[in-house]
Image (cartoon, grey):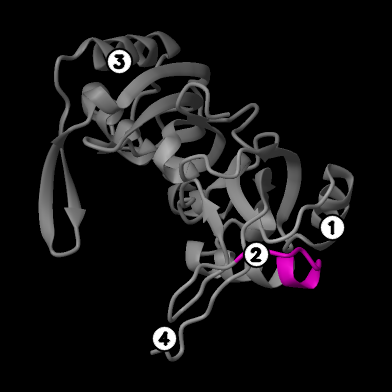
Amino acid sequence: MPDVGRTHAPEPRQRWRILFRRDEDARFLAHLDAMKLWERALRRAGIPVARTEGMSPRPRIVFAAPLPLGMLAEREIVDIVLSERLTIADMRRRLERDLPHGFSLVDLHDVWLHAPAVAAQLAGATYRLDVASRAPGPPLRAAEVGEAVAALLAADRLDRERRKEKRIVRYDLRPLIVGIEVLRWDEDGGGGGGAANGGAVAAAGDATRGTVGGGTGTLRVDLRHSQDEGTGRPDEVVAALGDVLGRDLAVTQGVRERLTLVEGAD
């Protein structure tokens, strides 16, 4: 007896690993909305995206990791499986012409069709974060911030709490931190550079304007993604740093610089 309503998708023929950038025009786009825009854009570009089989077939488009709302990005990763083969020149031309507004192509690779899902290969992420003190106070010296970073990295445990749905989850943040680097620190809070746009504090930092009194700076934070222990969050690292300093620190602008895959998966 035939499977009523079940579709039989064409055989997958090719997998492309796409590296892309997300800029200001798309930074407040939710992940599900971004996925819909990508699906629509790929259809418009005439790219033959393969579909899953079953009662509700879906395009075979897999993002390595969702982007936090408001976060810019420089080298995100998405895998796209095709039902027909395309040359790299043709694929590049179609993507550059039709990617959704606010996204741009960085690079692309023709990868092994039967490789594990890219999300399962995710090992970590690197963030560049503009931070500021949310309450007036004596200026934080760059040396103090450096010492606090060193103390954070030397800690055996960093017990934190995270709300998950309707319950509080307690976890150890320390194993999820690979490294923290202070790229700059301005004791007068004036800024000089910035995570994304030459020092301009974007909309995400509006809540801290007028209250910054302890200095501002930019950090680079490397975080680990673990299938067992979870994923490190940059805002939690900044909050933990603030606890060491005895200050309420906030992220005013953030950029995910790159995602790291397990060795051999790039």
Q: Quadrant of residue 138?
A: top left
Give the amino acid type for the residue marked by disc 1 in the picture: Arg
Closest to the camera, between mark 4 and mark 3, is 4
Identify residue for label 2: 38
Give the amino acid type for the residue marked by disc 4 in the picture: Asp
Closest to the camera, between mark 3 and mark 1, is 1
Which span of residues is magenta-colored?
Answer: 42-50
Which quarter of the image is occupied by the C terminus?
A: top right
Spatial CA distance of label 4 from label 3 is 62 Å
Q: Quadrant of residue 135?
A: top left
Question: Whole-percent x and y of residue 8?
Answer: 54, 75
Identify residue for label 3: 148
Q: Tell me if 82 is positioned left or right of 165 in this view.
A: right
* Mark 4 in CB contact with mark 3 (< 8 angstroms): no
Marks 4 and 1, the one that precedes in the sequence: 4
Marks 3 and 1, the one that precedes in the sequence: 1
Instruction: Say which mark, if any, is on residue 3.
Output: 4
